[in-house]
Amino acid sequence: MTGLLRDRTIVIVGAGPGFGRTLALRAAEEGATVVVAARTSSRLDGIVDEVREAGGSAIAAAVDATDPESVRALRDTVAGHTDAVHGLVYSAFSVPSMRPLAETDHDQIARGIDLSVLGALRATQEFTPLLEAGAGEGSPSSVVMMASAVIHHSRERYAGYKIAKTALVALGHSLATELGPRGIRVNTVAPGYIHGDTLTAYFEHLAAKYGGTVDDVYAHTAAKMDLRRLPTEREIVDPVLFLLSDAASAVTGQTLTVDCGEFHT
């Protein structure tokens, strides 16, 4: 631990069991009070318990990022605990349709944009006053939005997801320009494959469908990466912690791709 986020309050919207859990634990290790928020509130208690058992401070709150009133209620819950927020991470996620555009229902695309893009905008709008209160001279507050390396390719069946995540990056650019004068930085992180339980389950599905083993699927996928491996959850989380910290105090309006070298951006 380095105390990178000591005495800071970090709100994580979309704190699921994989990336969100790891981020909450790591941010707490670095001294932050973490607010974990997600639609499935039953998942949050376990994360909070883990953070507290490790000596950290955590708060759980349910939120539906597609519902403006729910996001506002989250803001009110956080405001009841603190008068300033120093970091907001938006990582709400749903499984994309994985169909070609010719077969994708327009409502599916609209739902993806609502969750990925408008949800991020709702959260940022609601928390802007608290983030502004958390900004200090030479120590701006930070918003980090989780995009995806899908923005760098046009592979079949990823189109709906790419539309939403590309729009999220554009949102981050515009918010960085608008909120910079208020002491708030805005950046996006674009992970590639994240080697964790969710991806392993998907690889198991592919191995059963096409033959071979999970290790075979991993090796085939990793062969596309410069480092010949896939990033772990920790390796996605640590760049997010950097962007939340004063080590990145002059970094805003940027998109950081973390994918072990699959794409060069």
Image (spheres, grey):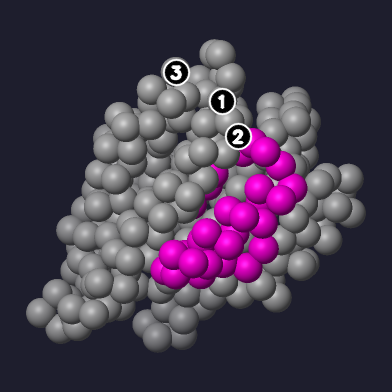
Give the CA distance from mark 3 to mark 1.
Answer: 13 Å
**Please, what is the three-letter code of the amino acid marked with disc 1?**
Ala
Q: Which residue lies at the image location 48% right of the left edge and 50% below the top edge?
A: 126
Instruction: Point out the tag, 3 or 2, that comes first from the N-terminus.
Output: 2
Magenta residue check for 73? yes
Frontmost of labels 3 and 1 is: 1
Give the CA distance from mark 1 to mark 2.
Answer: 7 Å
177 horizontally vs 29: left or right:
left
Instruction: Point out the tag, 1 or 2, that comes first from the N-terminus.
Output: 2
Residue pointed to by mark 2:
86
260 or 160: nearer the viewer: 160
Residue at disc 2, secondary structure: loop
Q: Could you tell me if residue 15 is visible in this image?
A: no
127 or 213: nearer the viewer: 127
Give the CA distance from mark 3 to mark 2.
Answer: 15 Å
**Please, what is the three-letter code of the amino acid marked with disc 3?**
Ala
Instruction: Establish if 146 lies above or below 16.
Output: above
Residue 182 x/y as whole percent = 43, 26
Q: Point out the residue furthest to the left here.
A: 102
Q: Which mark is residue 262?
A: none
Q: Which residues are magenta?
A: 61-90
Residue pointed to by mark 1:
135
Residue pointed to by mark 3:
250
